[in-house]
Image (tube, coloured by chain):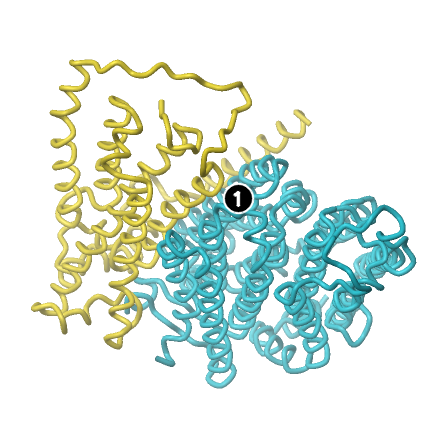
Amino acid sequence: MKALGLIAVLGTGLLLLAASRDFPNWGDPSSPASSYRLSRHFITQTINETAVPNMVTAVLADYRGYDTLFEAVVIFTAGIAVIGILRRYGNRDFIPAGGEVHLTPKQPDLIVESTVRLLIPVIQIFALYVIAHGHHSPGGGFQGGVIFGASFILLALARDLRTAQNWVAEKRMLILACCGILIYAGIGVLCQLLGENFLDYQILHRILPTDPVMARYHSILGVEIGVAFTVTAIMFSIYSNLSSNGQMKEGI
Amino acid sequence: MIDQAPAIVLLAPFLTAVLVVLVGMKYERACFPLVVLGLCCSAAAAVQTLLQVIEAGTLRYSMGGWPPPFGIEFRIDGLNALVALTVSTVALISAVYSKNRVPEENGDKISIYYTLLLLVVTWLLGMVMTGDAFNLYVLLEVSALTSYALIAMGTRRATVAAFKYAIMGTIGASFYLLGVGYLYIKTGSLNMFDIHEVLVAENLHQSTTVLVAFILITVGVWIKMAFFPLHAWLPNSYAFAPTTTSCLLGPLVTKVMVYVMIRMMLTVFDPLYTYLQLNWGNIVVWMAVIAILAGSLAALAQTDLRRMLAFLIVAEVGYMVGGVWLANTAGLVGAIYHLIADVFMTLCVFLFAGIVFAKTGKRDITATHGLFAKMPLTMAGLVVGALSLIGIPPTAGFFSKWYLIQGGMAAGHWGYVTALLISSLAMAVLFFRVFEYAFFGVKPAEGHGDHHPSGKGKFSEASASMLLPLLGTASLVLLIGIFNQSIVSIITDFVGQFNLTGSIMR
């Protein structure tokens, strides 16, 4: 079995090496990926068509917005899947394979607590900045959402899971995650209701006080906010399920 | 709204999934009607799409209004539309079946289970309809993720099986992604049809990178469709999953991957390239022969009913891969028609296995003892599905095998034809063994006590929510067989554009 595995690995490696013979040169400006009409269009037309200075965000949230909707739903699905597999409702106590884990109640630590109390607002404000500036500078819903979710995880780590749960209960997290997806998909469906294709943001100029190009610009922000909601909620939901063995009682 | 039909096929189950989470928190009983409603909308939109395609030819729908290749588009021809309709119909049938099963098997997580079920349907539909190679990867990844969870929600052994599936599936998806990446390096585009144009226009079919991309994509898809010997993840996953999961995923996942393989071979790479320039048809068909024989023989050795059916899936995948690689019109038409027919016959037998498990609580084949007397309607459903798998007219399985054998003979590949016949015999042995148990076996009442206290009288059929899907599927198997001409004509239109018999003569 091990020999078979080795053969498979060597075979794949040789295949990958063989493919690289025919690659365009490193950083070649005339390589197909950089010279094809696709990238030329993105580089030259993005600012005219969407008014978004950050090309990456424009491709991500507008030209290929349909893909990104599903990327956000990948995270949503992961969260639901973790709940589906791990979560144990009710008081049925589940004893893990390695025997029951007894956690000594955490003693409040002055230094850790004060640091965390000072840090969390800063982290959250930074997260909001990253989300709101996604279409101007590097950042966006995914990154901002992760930072925001991390602030809750930090709270759960520094105090305990219950304290963090008091701030954001399990159900509320799930509702938040659904809202994120509904914001994203809702913008798309709104475009359909106004008579254009799914996620064709420019038609939104009919209800927004802007022209079609700026409608795309603002919708990208809306979409990013939706993604951020989902990512924040699912980050914390996955953490609390994993750390408490699906019982949501005591975390690490 | 009519021109939005392709998007609604996908959006209806997707939005319902999110709603089910929200509604399910408070009103768990509302989940099931919502699921059925969402899937009905999807199926109706799929019918509408198919009618539009038959009437007006290829349908194009640009997501976000961006023309391809800048945006992502759905480009729906006869093949997509047929497979999409199949997927949404199967989803609807298994959702109806799940009415009593989900509360029983996953009672504390009804809304979570239904959400995952709707999401996996969304992904499969998206995979079938998309015209973008990278979008297909995203859906491939997330559909696998959802399937792992749906399988792991079963018994304890299901968790281990799902873990195995997760590892194999991830390898398959990464192979596919690497292949798409290599194509992007050489062509600079992600749209399937655009990639094809660039490959032909710049004569990239000579490039090694494109060759490696083709190998990676094909092997990745083979892992995902459980093509022997890459099938190790499949039997246990479908045998130990919750019964609704096996009814939904068992028929669909492998078949959708066969669709992806056909799409990649014919639309992205050119038939001239895959069939003529590479000229691997002979080797791959022999691999398919081995897959068919191995799958059928392994199925003979099983005592667990659902595990036996899972091995039949492995054999059926061999049928379709072989049919596609025979490289002639009859083989390809047969493979695509078999894809659709096989979805329904596999669903039929999996629904039967689910009902038997629900009624007796046993997974073994011997659980069917005396079922002809107790559950005649259920057994009638099984008989239709089994006869179709064996290939007896007028069921769908007969006609699909007929086309496949024709293709095998046209290609002069006698090994494939023999393998098909041997496998039909093996399936006959398998199912007649089940019939024998069910007809002559000891009645549970006399042998070892009645398993269901409620069954007072002679008959004790399953509840309507389980029986009707089975009977519906059985009649669909018959209908697809009887009206095979109209389905085949759609498939022939699709295959005809590649002009296989003209350009590729052996």
Q: Secondary structure at mark 1?
A: helix
Q: Is residue B169 above or below residue B25?
A: above
Looking at the picture, tell me which residue is in the foreground, A60 or A151: A151
Farthest residue toward the left? A209
Which residue is found at the position 61% from the left and 75% from the top? B491
Q: Looking at numbered disc 1 in the image, what kind of residue is underneath it?
A: Tyr
Q: Quadrant for residue A23, please give it.
A: top left
Q: Nearer the viewer, residue B350 or A45?
A: B350
Most extreme residue toward the right is B440
Q: Residue at x 12, y 31 (%)?
A: A122
Q: Which chain is yellow?
A: A
Residue A185 point in image, percent of width and height: 30, 60
Residue that carries the numbered disc 1 in the rendered image? B148
Q: Position of residue B329 (x, y in %)?
A: 67, 71
Q: Is residue A36 above or below residue B234?
A: below
Quarter of the image for the N terminus of chain A: give it. Answer: top right
**Number of numbered discs visible in the structure rendering:** 1
Answer above or below: position of B299 versus B346. Answer: above
Q: Could you tell whether B261 is left or right of A118 in the image?
A: right
- Image height check: is A146 above or below B177? above
Query: Which shade is chain B?
Result: cyan
Residue closer to the observer: B91 or B185: B91
Can residue B412 be seen here? The reply is: no
Instruction: Give the side of residue B411 with respect to residue A43, left or right.
Output: right
The reply to whether residue B31 is in sight is yes
Q: Chain of mark 1?
A: B
Residue B166 image position (x, y, % from top left): 53, 39
Q: Which of the image's four quarters has the C terminus of chain A? A: top left
Figure quadrant of residue A236: top left
CA neighbours of label 1 inside 10 A, class few (<14), some (14 to 19), many (20+)? many
Judge left or right: residue B145 versus residue B324: left
